[in-house]
């Protein structure tokens, strides 16, 4: 649950960060800015802001924004019917961005959200500098976090099936409820 | 056929245009810059420069560059086996960009390459300002052209099958031969 006031605040901050990164948005794009709190009700700690640029039955492109020190919870994109699962490419645009994927623990820059070490099991850190990219194969578990500057990135993918994403945190509900 | 010297020249100009547009490229990205003359041997008139950012079996992202008044020949992405054809989303980054698709002739900004009116049959003009996008469904015939400033754009798509593209100009061969 997120209050409308806070929802509007994180969306506006995110639009400002996209503007500062030099990404041009049309008025139509700006209206599509949204935010997800994953049902955890503390979006500035765990959450993400999302602007969908395009989405067809086959491919999708989004801009994702993390506010300073905001964390997107660990999740993976499962097989859905005949779809082997969403394949995703992240391309960093600006800010401090840390991805965590399967592999040897080398965490150095990021942090585990307080009391949630069971919900953040991937500990191989990949620092993405602006312009760098990371391929996330279908089904691969990942989470990501911004440093003190926040982060703006592109996410390009095969068909979006976000409401079917699987999360390590059993308390998560993917749908965000806005309290007016 | 294109001389190596000219190939290098159009690639370097295109990298400069991407830099000027504020798009960050890694050294690895820069090495991927290439150019296509479609076998017509006059790349500055008909041709395109291409930087592939990522390409998997399912999705691809490229940066396309047109030099001033350069034209990408009319083509379409056909059905290939079980693939219904490449679906493509163009997102304009900078410059003057005109797309031509099926529909009522409203050409105003662009021009037909000299003596080639049979090879450019789509005449519905869509002017793409920086930040604007256009969805090209699989199989839809299209061509595009830059105005006097040239143009830089993203192309996001389902699986790339470019060597199987179909062209309106019977003289076209999709593979570019570089003469050293």
Image: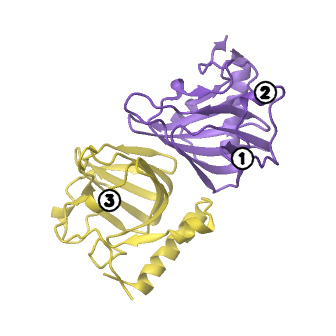
Chain colours: A purple, B yellow
Q: Position of residue B119 (x, y in %)?
A: 19, 63
Separation of marks 1 and 3 at Cα, in angstroms? 36 Å
> What is the x, y in percent for residue B32?
50, 68
Q: Which element type, helix, strand or loop, lies under badge 3?
A: helix
Give me the disc on residue A116. Answer: 2
The secondary structure type at the circle numbered 1 is: strand
Q: CA distance from mark 2 to mark 1?
A: 17 Å
Q: Is residue A22 visible?
A: no
In the image, farthest residue toward the bottom: B180
Q: Which mark is drawn over residue A124?
A: 1
Q: Quadrant of the C terminus of chain A?
A: top right
Is B74 placed left or right of B43 in the picture?
A: left
The residue lying toward the viewer, choosing from A136 and B154, is: A136
Residue B177, relative to residue B19: is it above or below? below
Disc 2 + disc 3, Cβ < 8 Å: no
Q: Point out the tag, 2 or 1, that comes first from the N-terminus.
A: 2
- Which residue is the extreme one toward the front? A104
Residue at the image point whose x is 19% and y is 61% from the top: B168
Q: Is residue B177 left or right of residue A41?
A: left
- Give the Cα distance between marks 2 and 3: 47 Å
Name the subunit of mark 2.
Answer: A
Check disc 2 and report its element: helix, strand or loop: loop
Q: Residues within 10 Å of mark 1 (few under 14, many from 20)?
A: some
- Whether residue B64 is visible, yes or no, is yes
The residue at 32%/79% (across/down) is B177
Residue at which label 3 appears: B162
Question: Image point 70% across, 47% down: which residue?
Answer: A20
Same-chain check, marks 2 and 1? yes
* Residue at 31% across, 70% down: B46
Residue B31: name its quadrant. Answer: bottom right
| Crowd band around label 2 with a 10 angstrom C-alpha radius: few (<14), some (14–19), many (20+) | few
């Amino acid at each position: 649950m997120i209050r409308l006031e806070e929802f509007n605040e994180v969306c506006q901050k995110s639009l400002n960060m996209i503007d500062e990164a030099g990404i041009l948005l049309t008025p139509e794009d700006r209206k599509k800015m949204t935010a997800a709190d994953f049902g955890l009700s503390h979006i500035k700690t765990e959450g993400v802001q999302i602007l969908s640029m395009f989405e067809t039955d086959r491919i999708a492109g989004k801009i994702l924004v993390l506010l300073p020190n905001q964390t997107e919870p660990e999740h993976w994109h499962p097989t859905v019917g005949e779809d082997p699962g969403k394949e995703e490419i992240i391309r960093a645009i600006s800010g401090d961005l840390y991805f965590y994927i399967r592999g040897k623990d080398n965490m150095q820059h990021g942090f585990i959200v307080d009391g949630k070490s069971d919900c953040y099991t991937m500990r191989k850190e990949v620092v993405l500098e602006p312009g760098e990219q990371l391929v996330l194969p279908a089904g691969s578990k990942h989470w990501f976090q911004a440093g003190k500057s926040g982060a703006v990135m592109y996410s390009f993918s095969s068909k979006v099936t976000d409401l079917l994403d699987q999360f390590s945190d059993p308390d998560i509900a993917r749908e965000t409820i806005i309290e007016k």
